[in-house]
Image (tube, rainbow, N blue to C red):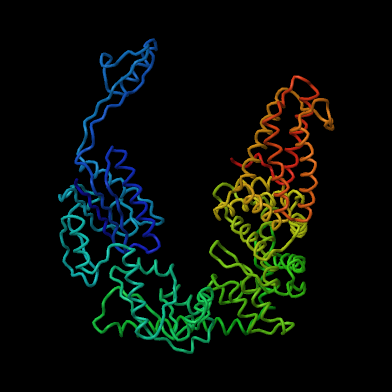
Amino acid sequence: MPQLLIELFSEEIPARMQAGAARDLERMAADRLKAAGLTWDALTTFAGPRRLTLVVEGLPTATPDREEELKGPRTSAPDQALDGFLRKTGLSKDQLTDRDGVWFAVIASKGVRTTDVVAGMVDQIVRGFPWPKSMRWGSGTLRWVRPLKRIVALFDGHVVPFEIDGIQSDNVTEGHRFMGGAKPFAVRDFADYRHKLRDHFVILDAAERRLHILEAAKATCHARGLELVDDDGLLDEVAGLAEWPTPILGDMDPAFLSLPPEVVRLSMKVHQKYFAVRRTADLQVRDAAPAAQADLKVRAPLAPHFLVVANVEATDGGSALAAGNSRVLSARLDDARFFWDEDLKTGFDVWARKLEGVTFHAKLGTLAERVERIAALAREIAPLVGADPDQAEQAARLAKADLASAMVGEFPELQGVMGGYYARALPLEGEGRRNAIADAVRDHYKPQGPADSVPTAPLTVAVALADKLDTLVGFFAIDEKPTGSKDPFALRRAALGFLRLVFESGVRLNFMEVAMNACERVRPATDVDPQDVANDLNYFVSDRLKVMFRDEGRRHDVAAAVIAYGVNDYVASRALIEALDVFLATDDGANLLAGNKRAANILRAEEKKGPLPTGERQAGLAGEPAAETALAYAVIAARADVDTALAAEDFAAAMTALSRLRGPVDTFFTDVMVNSDVPEERANRLKLLGQVRDVMGRVADFGMIAG
């Protein structure tokens, strides 16, 4: 079947917009083709520095004929209603059908040529394309990310004729801006298009450009005994900057390596789009355990070189390009060295005073006031994680200071990281604890996402927990909670980070108590009840725990069942959830869950008839079945065993105690009629089922568990 090829050729498209543009082009084209009644075999889009491309395989040559039935007014309706329906359909009254007193119209439409659909589709896409930023040029009304130059539109090898703001569709495109020659060239179909683009030094597919850069860069580095420092984000960006990417290795002044490596890498990446490299000999990973290799790579020193991805193949092998880029990089790194030297002259005391004039949030005070809250929280949490309270308070007071430094002002991504370096380089009280404090300052923002590592050093954990708790409590206290998909202060991420810290460190903190204490420190700026804030926050964090379990591939309904009764110690709650998850995977667990649901259904049905019987169950009624007696004794034993196990936090034992109910419950439902005609027997048996539900409810709300 025929193929459709569309290319929208323009001036340079920003790299950060290309992937989104490809997705938008795919969505908009698919929506419009579907609306026209067209089907296809495959639809693919490509994005590059100067072009968006769409190729659709297997399109029919025309849309199908259609018949659409429209329901109109009743035959007894006023003439005005019928007249309106006739105007809408374009039919006369004798063309309508009377069916059960209602007028119906059948609208038949012949199919249209696919080329007509394509012409209108491209016009709509171009005029309505959702660029984050666009511009209008010349005297026309068209807006595009950059001036649109050409439109290729081919269907079944023939040009689809149309015009958009003076740009006539054609079968002609252009190659590389510098290496592809000045003469445009014609294409026949997608295979010819892709082949000729490569002949004119354009790699169409972003994934292919990415792979080409990676392989060529690694080969270039390997030839010099170097290894590329991985950076997927930068790789994606440079793949959108060059149509014919050519990695070139350059040299830099080794003196710049005295700067923190993060500064060197960020200067290269942000300002110049260069990759950093390391000496292969410095990696020392071959003899290391697999788990340690990644860490050794990260810690290996940088080499005095860089790798730039050029958009041309230079006749001198890139020597002049490398030299020019080296001079530019030196200027950037000179700026970074100036920031570093000036910051070392300034120090923490000056930065701390600057924070007094920086507003954190209008309702939560300055950054200096936030630091005071975090310091108090860190001192409170420190004993719980095995850290020294004085050190925790000192580290917390230093943690935000680098926000006022010149280096972080230039590179906000380095907040925390630079604080760690400055804590090692500047004078501190208690020199013997410098490294632990510096690590806490460096890592207190962690974990910032699901892929981020979780610190385990007690001092770091204390400061990191304090930082996240102050964020959560503060914004909940001023009613800035996440709503729907909106979370402007990243509170969901903060809650997940808090949970990961708690679970990794095993800290046993009383969440409600700590949250209320934190709220008291915020309270002078707010008019809230700390108990209410702590309750709301506890519910929010517990909900994040369910999300965490779901993301781990676990049953989040089991987590919800345990959390339903409230959480105060998240470590204990997680252990209980995991034990219950294991128990429910056994036959005893599955059958007991089924028995509990049956008991709950009976009790629910009886509650609709009237209040359930209350008071103590009567033991030893005349004629009581053995199965009822056995279940009554089993419930008494299970209640005692479950309470003892839960008090000792032996959750496996609690599950074992519940499992002993499985047999008596099964036998009870087999041998005993709950709704006895004898009122005393019925009341006794309903009370017994209520006891079963209550014993199981000591562990979790089993009614929330699917199964």
Q: Look at 62% across and 77% down and name the residue there.
A: 420
Residue 8, placed above or below residue 218: above
Residue 30, placed above or below residue 403: above
Is residue 523 in sight in this rendering? Answer: no
Q: Nearer the viewer, residue 83 or 628?
A: 628
Q: Nearer the viewer, residue 374 or 693?
A: 693
Q: Quadrant of residue 148?
A: bottom left
Q: How many marks?
A: 0
Q: Position of residue 122 (x, y in %)?
A: 27, 47
Q: Nearer the viewer, residue 112 or 509?
A: 509
In the displayed orientation, state which residue is furthest to the top. 76
Q: Quadrant of residue 368?
A: bottom right
Q: Nearer the viewer, residue 187 or 367?
A: 187
Q: Position of residue 251 (x, y in %)?
A: 39, 86
Q: Position of residue 593 (x, y in %)?
A: 64, 40
Is residue 287 in sight in this rendering? Answer: yes
Position of the C terminus by quadrant: top right
Position of the N terminus by quadrant: top left
Q: Position of residue 650 (x, y in %)?
A: 74, 55
Determine whether, in the image, residue 486 is placed left or right of residue 88.
Answer: right
Determine whether, in the image, residue 311 is placed left or right of residue 596.
Answer: left
